[in-house]
Amino acid sequence: MKRALVTGGSGDLGRAICRQLAIDGLHVIVHGYRHPEQAAAVVAAIQTTGGSAETALFNVADETQTRDVLSKLLEAGPIQVLVNNAGVHVDAPMAGMSSAQWRLPIEVCLHGFFNVTQPLLLPMIGVRWGRIISISSLSGVIGNRGQTNYAAAKAGLHGATKALALELASRGITVNAIAPGLIAGGDTETVFNTDAIQRLVPMKRAGTPEEVAALTGFLASESAAYLTGQIINLNGGIA
């Protein structure tokens, strides 16, 4: 059974992705940090329906802690599917943004990508099969007011995705990113009301975590073996 690690696995989006990968027959390692009880609940839900899962608790922005946890997980063999979903945004106009606000999304979204992905590469290369999928954002594609920090982190992730895909293309490993638009859940429902969503999204609705999870499941599958180096916009038609 192939193993999948989903960072940020306890939130709305991460939970849907974990469920999808478990349905697809993978053993899912549900990552958590600030809310370990939520990660445990995701594992319990997967196991209740006959799936295979466990938790892994660490701060993706802490390189030493991340490597220590991953080295223990790798003792059982390679992790062949990685979903980099952990992220954070601290919104503010750049004119009033503190250096701490600037750094936090970059430390989690971009440095976290390196901290988690790099230790898994050689084991993946050794078996010549792997799927690396990063959950980005529409903000990293077209920008967004109040999110210069977050947009910079996600745009950096896009460049890393394309470069790493070239490095690994001959090794049976694909590297892609999904850039969701407005997805139903806590942040979207707090910031955007129904009228705003209908005005902004050509499809006149928010996407669902399950739609992001379905695309993630495809990218993690054998069927996606020829698709790599892509930033896939999943946003209901927003240009």
Image: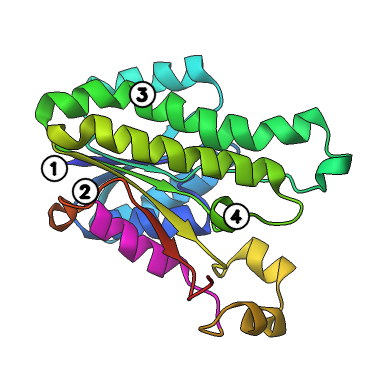
Q: Is residue 22 magenta?
A: no
Disc 3 versus disc 4: distance between alpha carbons? 25 Å
Amino acid type for the residue under numbered disc 2 = Leu
Q: How dense is the environment of label 2, judged by Cα within 10 Å: few (below 14), some, or many (20 and up)?
A: many
Where disc 2 sits, the SS reads loop
Segment colored magenta:
205-220
* Quadrant in the rendering for residue 51: bottom left
Residue name at image x 56 percent, y 70 percent: 184
* Quadrant in the rendering for residue 143: bottom right
Nearer the observer, disc 3 or disc 2?
3
Q: Locate residue 67, reporting x and y percent.
A: 41, 18
Residue ID for mark 1: 1
Residue ID for mark 4: 139
Residue ID for mark 2: 26
Amino acid type for the residue under numbered disc 4 = Ser
Residue name at image x 56 percent, y 85 percent: 204
Asked whether the viewer can see residue 220, the reply is yes
Q: Earlier in the sequence, mark 3 or mark 4?
A: 3
* Quadrant in the rendering for residue 189: bottom right
Disc 4 versus disc 2: distance between alpha carbons? 30 Å
